[in-house]
Image (cartoon, rainbow, N blue to C red):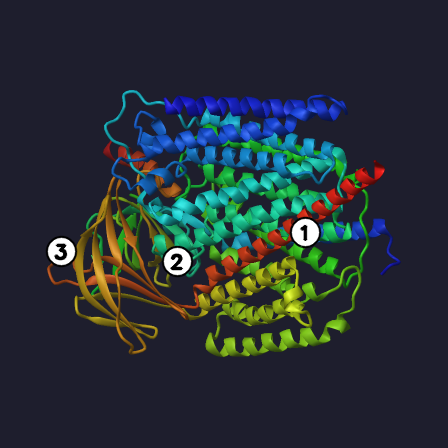
């Protein structure tokens, strides 16, 4: 019953999206159409219905209604409740429903609160949003119905991939989706602005909070996803350049560029066409990512279903939306009037440089991700990994970070570098000192050395915009920028230190034996069986002592899940302020003989936690900027209301 | 700089962006040719071996009876074959659970100077829903080879 209810809500939502689109078009074509008043309320109801459908799906998963095909394929009655619910989006259909739900909610949110732009632009924006939603509704209803029934009802479900049964999963995909789909708002704003030819500072100021919001979620989602892969896969790495990771990185790169070009447009009324273009590209990257992941053309842990029909469907959606938006851009870009000029040495130029470099990285990642597909068409199977991605992205990241050190200190419009001699010397000296130190400490490791040199220089330089200001009077958006840039330096230091100083040890130990790894001494104290709700495991107890200190216990496990049957290595982490000890328990080294040795894989990763701390700082910076912008917009709104009110009173 | 007209500035910006993106594309294309890791079946590897040290991936069947553990307890040696050629492989690490004699494997690594394949990573079938894509095709190849051999 609940499943049918959900399906009905989904159909209604799709119908309302069509109505939203149709009335929007009618309102735009005939200026004073009564349908114009319909667009906003319909957008709100459409979002609410999508949410209802999603709630229905959560409910059938929560009560493990096995007559629903999706539940039977992806859930199991013996799973803990948290993973039953998380299982609702840990599959293709459910994640697409989450996608349209977020998209509908974002649309209704805009419809309710956004009053800053001229009404035709808003109607065009909501029309764009409805048009995009419509495609995904059709996709859900005709090619991936999450509420399909199963007859006969199976006695038990097939369970959820144990790799996905982790608290990180309950939180990481929805966060990323909020980011991906939040960018649809930027896309719709861009389309709306192109349709009504209203590209200017007001447009940028209206779009910026939405981009910021999506960007914060993307940052958090990528950070959390990276940590999840780090501890759950048990491979010791934190970024694998897996297509799915790239699919989340590409929209982030585009959104980061968009964020910076938005601030140029808002402050200086320049980079108009470029900002609109980035708005289109950012969401297009979200959709390309979804296509890569969901179509099954690339296999990975994240590719739920391999179904050529779905791949074709998403490809068609991609072609319509990206092609359509780019065509609109091509027709209208020439009529977007020219913005203000600026000198070569200016804040604008630094931000243009940032945008070009980010686009370069985006191009590198996109090509590396698509290359295996292209060669496969010619019968050659290749895979592309870190030997390509690391150095090639560094080619763009390094100049970008150097400019990042100086850019925020530059004035808008025109400036001279001689004014910045002091800060440049300070950052340069810090960087060179760090470079010397890094060459001594990590000889021969080129990329980590560059990172170790750049990170302190960027960290110092990122704080310089605060110099000579009263800290209590610094506005929130400036704090946001400083903290986000500082976060980049922190994350970079973590990445570089991990690359330069990680020590790894692979050994076979008898119970009672000890092995060193970095400054640690690890003793295998015992191995014993333990049991969880839907798994059993062998658990090792390791006594780890740092530099001769008191031993700390840590417990890596080898888990055996029984629904579905699968073994996973559950790594154990010991965190200190200066790094993490990462331990994985392997197999018996000498077959089944009693008293034999056990394989252990141990890493000491100095400063590795800075990677995710940096990610969190970047997101925090975004949050501060968002709060600051929204607060000042609200103040402005209140002030203009007061003025209007006074005028009315005086007029009387 | 103020002598530059608005139109010109726009043109210059567009040109810079275009050049940067073309440069990124050219760089990527060049790097992909040299850095992408190609997929080999044992027969391909025997017929046309890549230079030692180049990152490649090798896919095939783990030959029955070939898996041996070295005395250190963490190095595994085995032979990957496809019915036409055999490649000795050594791997230091914890093998995946579904790594078995007689089943498929994809090894990431490189040839050493003696023609032995040194694997950094082994991909075996993870579970029903996650199979390395080469392996799906490979088992089909194997099936065909098996049919040919029995006829």
A452 on left or right of A476 = left
Residue A239 percent coordinates (x, y): 45, 55
Under tag 1, what secondary structure? helix
Q: Which residue ends up furthest to the right in the rendered image?
A: B3
Q: Toward which corner of the image does residue A45 lie, by quadrant?
A: top right
Residue A4 percent coordinates (x, y): 40, 21
Under tag 3, what secondary structure? loop
Question: Do the numbered discs 1 and 2 sit on residues whose CB atoms are within 8 Å?
Answer: no
Q: Residue at x 44, y 47 (%)?
A: A172
Whether labels 1 and 3 belong to a single chain: the reply is yes
Q: Is residue A230 above or below residue A640?
A: below
Q: Can you identify the residue that label 1 sits on?
A: A632
Whether labels 2 and 3 belong to a single chain: the reply is no
A471 on left or right of A650 = left
Label 2: chain letter: B
Q: Quadrant of the N terminus of chain A?
A: top left
Q: Toward which corner of the image does residue A22 lie, by quadrant?
A: top right
Q: Is residue B48 above or below residue A52?
A: below
The alpha-carbon separation of the residues under discs 2 and 3 comes to 31 Å
Q: Residue at x 71, y 55 (%)?
A: A352
In-front residue for pair A131/A622: A622
Lower position in the chain sequence, tag 1 or tag 3: 3
Under tag 2, what secondary structure? strand
Q: Can you identify the residue that label 2 sits on?
A: B110
Q: Residue at x 68, y 54 (%)?
A: B20
Q: Residues within 10 Å of mark 3 (few under 14, many from 20)?
A: few
Q: Quadrant of the C terminus of chain A?
A: top right
Question: Do the numbered discs 2 and 3 sit on residues whose CB atoms are within 8 Å?
Answer: no
Q: Can you identify the residue that label 3 sits on?
A: A592
């Amino acid at each position: 019953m609940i499943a049918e209810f959900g399906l009905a809500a989904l159909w209604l939502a799709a119908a309302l999206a069509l109505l939203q689109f149709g009335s929007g078009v009618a309102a735009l074509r005939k200026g004073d159409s009564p349908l114009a008043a319909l667009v906003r309320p319909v957008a709100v109801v459409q979002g609410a219905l999508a949410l209802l459908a999603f709630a229905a799906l959560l409910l059938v998963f929560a009560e493990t209604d096995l007559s629903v095909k999706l539940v039977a394929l992806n859930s199991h009655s013996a799973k803990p409740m948290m993973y039953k619910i998380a299982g609702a989006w840990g599959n293709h259909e459910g994640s697409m429903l989450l996608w349209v739900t977020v998209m509908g909610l974002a649309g209704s949110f805009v419809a309710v609160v956004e009053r800053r732009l001229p009404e035709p632009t808003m109607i065009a924006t909501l029309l764009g949003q409805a048009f995009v939603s419509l495609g995904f509704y059709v996709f859900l209803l005709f090619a991936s119905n999450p509420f399909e029934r199963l007859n006969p009802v199976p006695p038990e479900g097939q369970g959820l991939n144990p790799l996905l049964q982790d608290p990180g999963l309950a939180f990481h995909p929805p966060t990323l989706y909020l980011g991906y789909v939040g960018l649809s708002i930027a896309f719709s704003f861009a389309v709306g602005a192109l349709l009504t030819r209203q590209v200017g500072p007001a447009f940028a100021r209206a779009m910026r909070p939405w981009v910021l919001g999506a960007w914060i979620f993307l940052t958090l989602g990528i950070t959390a996803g990276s940590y999840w892969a780090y501890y759950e896969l048990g491979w010791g790495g934190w970024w694998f350049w897996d297509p799915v990771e790239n699919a989340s990185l590409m929209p982030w790169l585009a959104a980061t560029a968009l964020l910076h070009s938005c601030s140029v447009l808002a402050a200086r009324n320049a980079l108009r066409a470029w900002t609109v273009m980035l708005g289109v590209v950012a969401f297009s990257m979200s959709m390309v990512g979804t296509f890569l992941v969901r179509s099954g053309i690339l296999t990975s842990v994240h590719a739920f279903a391999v179904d050529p029909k779905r791949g074709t469907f998403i490809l068609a959606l991609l072609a319509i939306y990206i092609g359509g938006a780019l065509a609109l851009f091509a027709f209208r870009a020439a009529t977007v009037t020219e913005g203000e000029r600026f000198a070569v040495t200016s804040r604008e130029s630094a931000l243009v440089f940032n945008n070009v470099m980010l686009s370069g990285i985006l191009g590198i990642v996109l090509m590396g991700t698509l290359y295996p597909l292209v060669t496969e068409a010619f019968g050659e199977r290749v895979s592309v990994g870190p030997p390509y991605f690391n150095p090639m992205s560094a080619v763009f990241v390094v100049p970008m970070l150097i400019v990042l050190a100086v850019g925020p200190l530059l004035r808008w419009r025109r400036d001279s570098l001689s004014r910045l001699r002091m800060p440049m010397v300070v950052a340069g000296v810090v960087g060179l000192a760090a470079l010397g130190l890094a060459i001594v400490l990590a000889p021969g490791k080129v990329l980590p050395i560059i990172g170790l040199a750049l990170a302190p220089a960027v960290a110092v330089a990122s704080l310089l915009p605060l110099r000579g200001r009263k800290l209590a009077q610094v506005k929130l958006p400036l704090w946001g920028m400083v903290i986000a840039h500082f976060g980049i330096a922190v994350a970079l230091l973590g990445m570089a230190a991990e690359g330069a100083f990680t020590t790894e040890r692979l050994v076979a130990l008898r119970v009672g034996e000890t092995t060193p790894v970095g400054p640690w001494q690890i003793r295998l104290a015992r191995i014993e069986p333990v049991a969880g709700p839907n798994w059993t495991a062998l658990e090792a107890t390791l006594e780890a002592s740092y530099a001769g200190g008191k031993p700390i216990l840590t417990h890596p496990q080898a888990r055996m899940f029984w629904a579905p049957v699968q073994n996973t290595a559950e790594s154990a982490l010991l965190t200190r302020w200066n790094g993490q000890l990462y331990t994985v328990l392997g197999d018996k080294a000498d077959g089944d003989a009693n008293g034999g040795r056990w394989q252990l894989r141990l890493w000491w990763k100095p400063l590795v936690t800075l990677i995710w701390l940096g990610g969190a700082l970047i997101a925090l910076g975004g949050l501060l900027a968002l709060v600051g912008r929204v607060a000042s917009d609200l103040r402005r709104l209140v002030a203009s209301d007061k003025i209007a009110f006074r005028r009315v009173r005086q007029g009387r | 700089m103020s002598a530059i007209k608005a139109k010109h500035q726009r043109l210059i910006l567009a040109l810079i962006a275009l050049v940067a993106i073309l440069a990124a594309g050219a760089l990527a294309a060049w790097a992909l040719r040299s850095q992408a890791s190609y997929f080999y079946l044992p027969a391909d590897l025997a017929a046309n071996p890549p230079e030692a040290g180049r990152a490649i991936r090798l896919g095939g069947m783990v030959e029955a009876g070939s898996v041996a553990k070295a005395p250190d307890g963490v190095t595994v040696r085995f032979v990957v074959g496809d019915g036409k050629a055999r490649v000795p492989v050594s791997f230091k690490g914890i093998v995946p659970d579904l790594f078995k004699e007689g089943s498929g494997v994809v090894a990431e690594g490189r040839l050493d100077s003696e023609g032995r394949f040194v694997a950094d990573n082994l991909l075996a079938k993870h579970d029903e829903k996650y199979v390395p894509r080469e392996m799906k095709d490979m088992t089909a190849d194997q099936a065909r080879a098996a049919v040919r051999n029995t006829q």
